[in-house]
Image (cartoon, grey):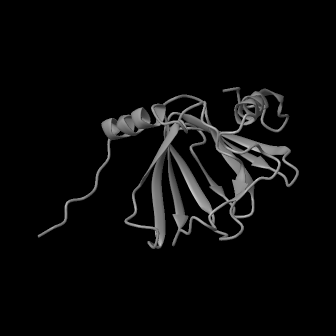
Amino acid sequence: MKKRLDTWGHEFLMSLVERATSSPRRRQHLNLHSDHSDSCQRLLNAICADSYIRPHRHVLDPKEELLIVLQGEVVCWYFDDSGTVVDAVRMKAGGEFFGVTIHAHQWHTITACDTAAVILEVKAGPFDPLTAKLMAPWAPEEGSAGASAYLKWLTQQLPLRREARHIRPC
């Protein structure tokens, strides 16, 4: 007997977005892999515009991360070791830029430009939550008093970036 293929469509993505909008973290992920021991970790992540993902990098378990925008618009931010924004890539589903590969040692975060942003994340496994991320010491902790102010400051940097003139503000 043939196994039925797993399929996902627009309604599926919208249900994930609905869960993100009602989540305290204002995002919702869904693992597409069986478990953390799988050799390929795949997940969908619905992110609202007011969701703060603390900048981080993957050095304890150095693996590249592939992000592809399936719905909406996001910005992938890159930082140097002091927390200065060194680059930003605005990506839109079906747009000129729709995906990035993030290198293991690169400080980064993602911000959504709208409520219905959904990205596909792919990374080599296995996944160990204890070594997955090193949080940026110069960025506020998620849920702290400074997190929303930092997110607002960050999104206001887009029109100020000389290297990213083609990127309009969220």
Q: Position of residue 92 (x, y in %)?
A: 56, 36
Q: Is residue 119 above or below residue 112?
A: below
Residue name at image x 70 percent, y 26 percent = 169
Q: Position of residue 161 (x, y in %)?
A: 82, 34
Report the number of numbered marks: 0
| Quadrant occupied by the C terminus | top right
The quarter of the displayed image where residue 64 is located: bottom right
Q: Position of residue 123 (x, y in %)?
A: 54, 63
- Camera-nearest residue between 112 and 159: 112
The quarter of the displayed image where residue 61 is located: bottom right
The answer to whether residue 82 is left or right of residue 70 is right
| Quadrant occupied by the N terminus | bottom left
Q: Is residue 113 above or below residue 28?
A: above
Q: Position of residue 22 (x, y in %)?
A: 45, 32
Whether residue 168 is visible to the viewer of this picture, yes or no, is: yes
The answer to whether residue 104 is left or right of residue 124 is right
Residue name at image x 60 percent, y 60 percent = 65
- Camera-nearest residue between 138 and 95: 138
Residue farthest to the left? Answer: 1
Q: Is residue 140 above or below residue 38?
A: above
The quarter of the displayed image where residue 141 is located: top right
Whether residue 46 is visible to the viewer of this picture, yes or no, is: no
Q: Is residue 91 above or below residue 125?
A: above
Residue farthest to the right? Answer: 82
